[in-house]
């Protein structure tokens, strides 16, 4: 990225009023800010826009990227159940992760609730906070807010007033002095909930209040009022995050409302409430609307809310297209600027320059031209944001009314008894330039000092790359006609292989690995389970084929012998292809995924990927931990940590599919725990983990079941037309890891456990099939007949194949699965022996 790869920016001023203060940057590195303005904000030509605290501006490429996304994808209502709806749901969840990553936190700590803006987020907290009303038996909760808070925060007091909860405004100076005094005595046993709200950055003056207040208030070291109880903190971050990074891992407020148009300019009317998960269970929900109810009855008082916090509080269908637009906003902002730290430096540099120049302007009699409302004196971006609030004065020190904001915006009541009813605010955004600041200063000089050229605007002393600004070699140090008290100097691996692929179609084991290990017996034997082992020591069940699918939804990689890891076959579903929004692609959206053929070479520790018409490409099996950037992705409602495999493979996939794609891999330190399913209890001392699979570590199918379905499919249909499907074709459609030569069709559905060699597996239950089995894995063509026939023949859910999970696994020595290994099934306890043929009644045999 241009901004991130280059230096953080050019220094705008060679010196600083405080020599110890850090030097600040103007611009975003090597790229010209003037070029950025011309390319991304050409509509600003001839316009000086200085209301970024009200709403910043969207870039052209952000809008183009979002529009292209909408033109290329079909997004349905996320509450529906279809492919388009799932794409929307998954994309929205990816955006939630992106938001949390932007604020340096994860879903472990925070939940993102989308709202209609920061005001709606504040209203949600006011209505859902667990207030305790004042009464005979309780002093009640307290709602405290900083007097420098936004109108929407102050408005929360009307909600608390209605339920007899006391509201207390707290002046900043009172909190500063309380901080200096230290903590007063408190009652640690009192759990009465109180809420303190304050802005990270004042909307009025841009002053920034300490983020350290969050922990001080929560811990009791700093109390807004001397009332015992447990304090929660709401940090109003809407203004602050528009131009600065916020690290919620370091400053863990309970509630953080934000508005996205303050950051990106688009979309408007969309915000979020970031709720710390420790506080989320305390929120009380009264109203429920579309999407928030898991179940309800209209005729009686019965209602079950959705499980997740976000689903419970996002009434109705969220503005999902606007949510999707956020991803393009984050991408564009990062690409253009290199990140929020650069934006903080750039915008403050402009604000500091403007503040110093503006506060230095004087009339010939020495009277100041403006009165600026700020206590920070713009000493650093830690205490001041890029906002300047002021009133213009005449040469006698009287405020000149601006006829804009009074008691009601738009009236003419700008002064009452000589006092202003409002003030003027200017603010800078990431695309603001020195030209904007100087145009504003020139306006003040020309209108108040009546000089249309006699008194030039103060200039910067650096090579800014901007026309009209002097170079670093310039010796001119031009100042306004009268300089006041300020100067003009405001201040960034190790497993060896058991198989090697080649260009031929044969698959052979290479005997370079140790023999199959003996797994320690830690589970009950079949006799201890009072269940039967089908057939004896040399029964008919044998592994006939082994497959792994290195890239989720891509072609199978067939092996004859392969290592077993703690998540299944080594490297099975370790990678997945995602779209430009980071959403996993499956064959339901992109059938041509089955034409991508991965081959793993354990000796060279690479995966080679092939596809027709494409040159083969190599991908390392493991990440480079020093350069890898971990990000959050989503698989079957689970959060997984992944990393991008690089631009080279991304370009390869994008060329093949004709749209932007990335290859991502599950991070080696990511642990995705298997859910307890099908009534199976987790075994003592074990915790099954998953790769990027949907349900379980392994999927097993029975050749006899395939043959039965093959027979049904190859019978004539109503029109007498034969539709021929080979057994091989059908087997590949079901994308199993282990194929066995069973004796009876669907007998595997009566098994409780199986042993393959020395490895033991728990049978979790059947695989519920979807439309993916309609896709020919050799061609990518769809045919619904397989799904329809399976549905007719099973007369239940469309089940085919059984999920398996390790019951125990000792990885102290290498373990392998091999073709030809004996499979010993154990019947379910509720399956009666007399229901089976005599030859299949159980024998109490151990494997």
Image (tube, rainbow, N blue to C red):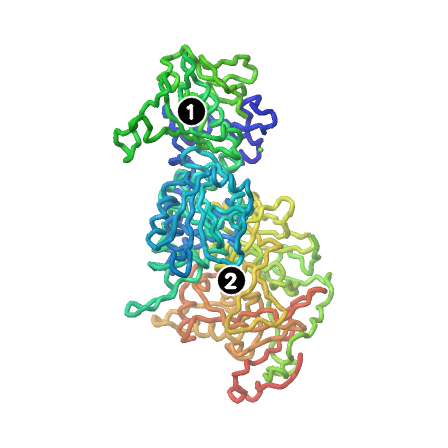
Q: Secondary structure at mark 2?
A: loop
Image point (43%, 37%), residue name: 202
Q: Looking at the image, which residue sits at the far front?
A: 136
* Numbered label tally: 2
Q: Residue 401's spot in the image, x, y percent?
A: 31, 25
Q: Is residue 382 visible from the viewing direction of this image?
A: yes
Q: Is residue 570 above or below residue 824?
A: above
Residue picked out by circle 2: 694
Q: Marks 1/2: CA distance?
A: 54 Å
Image point (53%, 50%), residue name: 220
Label 1: how many Cα within 10 Å (few below 14, some 14–19, many 20+) = some
Q: Looking at the image, which residue sits at the far left?
A: 411
Q: Secondary structure at mark 1?
A: helix
Image point (43%, 49%), residue name: 273
- Who comes first in sequence, dot 1 or dot 2? 1
Mark 1 vs mark 2: give the one in front. Answer: 1
Residue picked out by circle 1: 436
Near-viewer residue (333 or 204): 204
Label 2: how many Cα within 10 Å (few below 14, some 14–19, many 20+) = some
Q: Residue 536's spot in the image, x, y percent?
A: 64, 83
Q: Kindly identify which numbered label has been placed on residue 446.
A: none
Q: Is residue 151 above or below residue 421?
A: below
Near-viewer residue (818 or 10): 10
């Amino acid at each position: 990225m241009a901004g991130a790869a280059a230096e953080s920016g050019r220094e705008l001023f060679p010196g600083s009023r405080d020599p110890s203060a850090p030097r600040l940057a103007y611009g975003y590195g090597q790229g010209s800010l003037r070029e950025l303005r011309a390319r991304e904000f050409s509509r600003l030509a001839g316009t000086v826009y200085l209301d970024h605290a009200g709403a910043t501006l969207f870039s052209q490429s952000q809008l183009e990227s979002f529009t292209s996304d909408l033109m290329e994808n079909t997004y349905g209502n996320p509450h529906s159940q279809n492919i388009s709806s799932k794409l929307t749901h998954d994309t929205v969840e990816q955006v939630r992760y992106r938001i949390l990553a932007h604020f340096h936190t994860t879903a472990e700590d925070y939940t993102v609730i989308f709202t209609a803006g920061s005001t709606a987020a504040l209203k949600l907290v006011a209505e859902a906070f667990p207030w305790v009303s004042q009464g005979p038996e309780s002093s009640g909760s307290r709602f405290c807010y900083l007097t420098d808070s936004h109108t929407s925060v102050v408005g929360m007091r009307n909600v608390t007033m209605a339920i007899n909860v006391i509201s207390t405004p707290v002046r900043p100076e009172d909190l500063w002095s309380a901080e200096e005094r230290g903590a007063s005595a408190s009652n640690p046993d009192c759990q009465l909930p109180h809420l303190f709200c304050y802005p990270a950055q004042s909307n009025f003056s841009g002053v920034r209040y300490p983020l350290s207040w969050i922990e001080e208030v929560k811990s009791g070291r700093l109390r807004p009022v001397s009332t015992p109880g447990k304090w929660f903190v709401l940090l109003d971050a809407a203004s602050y995050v528009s131009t600065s990074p916020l690290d919620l891992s370091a400053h863990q407020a309970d509630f953080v409302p934000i508005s996205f148009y303050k950051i990106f300019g688009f979309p408007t009317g969309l915000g979020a409430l970031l709720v710390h998960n420790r506080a989320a269970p305390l929120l009380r929900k009264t109203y429920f609307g579309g999407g928030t109810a898991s179940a309800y009855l209209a005729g009686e008082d019965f209602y079950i809310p959705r499980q997740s916090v976000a689903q419970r509080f996002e009434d109705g269908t969220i503005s999902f297209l606007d949510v999707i637009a956020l991803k393009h906003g984050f991408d564009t902002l990062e690409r253009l600027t290199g990140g929020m730290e650069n934006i903080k430096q750039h915008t403050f540099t402009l604000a500091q320059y403007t503040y110093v120049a503006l506060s230095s302007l004087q009339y010939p009699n020495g009277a100041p031209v403006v009165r600026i409302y700020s206590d920070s004196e713009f000493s650093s971006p830690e205490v001041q944001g890029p906002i300047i609030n002021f009133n213009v004065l005449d040469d006698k020190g009287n405020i000149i009314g601006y006829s804009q904001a009074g008691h009601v915006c738009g009236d003419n009541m700008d002064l009452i008894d000589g006092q202003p009813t409002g003030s003027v605010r200017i603010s800078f955004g990431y695309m603001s330039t020195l030209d904007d600041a100087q145009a504003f200063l020139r306006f003040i000089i020309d209108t108040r000092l009546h000089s249309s050229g006699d008194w030039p605007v103060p200039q910067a002393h650096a090579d800014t790359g901007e026309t009209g600004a002097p170079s670093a070699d310039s010796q001119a140090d031009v100042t306004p006609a009268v300089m006041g008290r300020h100067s003009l100097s405001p201040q960034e691996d190790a497993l060896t292989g058991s198989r090697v692929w080649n260009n031929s179609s044969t698959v052979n084991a290479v005997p370079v690995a140790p023999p199959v290990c003996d797994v320690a017996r830690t589970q009950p034997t079949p006799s201890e389970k009072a269940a039967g082992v089908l057939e004896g020591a040399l029964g008919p069940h044998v592994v006939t084929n082994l497959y792994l699918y290195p890239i989720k939804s891509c072609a199978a990689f067939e092996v004859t012998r392969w290592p077993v890891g703690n998540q299944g076959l080594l490297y099975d579903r370790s990678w997945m292809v995602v779209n430009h929004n980071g959403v996993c692609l499956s064959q339901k959206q992109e059938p041509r995924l089955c034409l991508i053929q991965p081959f793993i070479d354990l000796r060279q520790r690479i995966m080679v990927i092939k596809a027709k018409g494409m040159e083969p490409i190599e991908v390392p099996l493991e990440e480079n931990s020093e350069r890898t950037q971990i990000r959050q992705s989503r698989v079957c409602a689970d959060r997984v940590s992944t990393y991008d495999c690089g631009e080279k493979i991304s370009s390869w996939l994008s060329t093949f599919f004709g749209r932007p794609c990335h290859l991502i891999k599950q991070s080696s330190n990511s642990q995705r725990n298997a859910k307890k399913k099908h009534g199976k209890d987790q075994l003592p001392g074990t915790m099954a983990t998953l790769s990027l699979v949907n349900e379980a570590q392994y999927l097993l199918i029975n050749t006899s079941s395939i043959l039965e379905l093959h027979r049904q499919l190859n019978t004539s249909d109503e029109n007498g037309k034969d539709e021929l499907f080979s057994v091989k074709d059908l087997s590949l459609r079901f994308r199993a890891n282990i194929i066995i030569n069973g004796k009876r069709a669907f007998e595997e559905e009566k098994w409780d456990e199986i042993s393959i060699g020395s490895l033991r597996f728990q049978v979790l239950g059947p695989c519920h099939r979807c439309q993916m089995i309609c896709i020919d894995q050799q061609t990518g063509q769809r045919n619904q007949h397989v799904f329809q026939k399976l549905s007719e023949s099973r007369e239940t859910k469309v089940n085919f194949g059984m999920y398996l999970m390790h019951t125990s696994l000792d990885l102290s020595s290498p373990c392998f699965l091999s073709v030809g290994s004996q499979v010993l099934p154990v019947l379910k306890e509720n399956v009666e022996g007399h229901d089976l043929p005599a030859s299949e009644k159980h024998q109490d045999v151990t494997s």
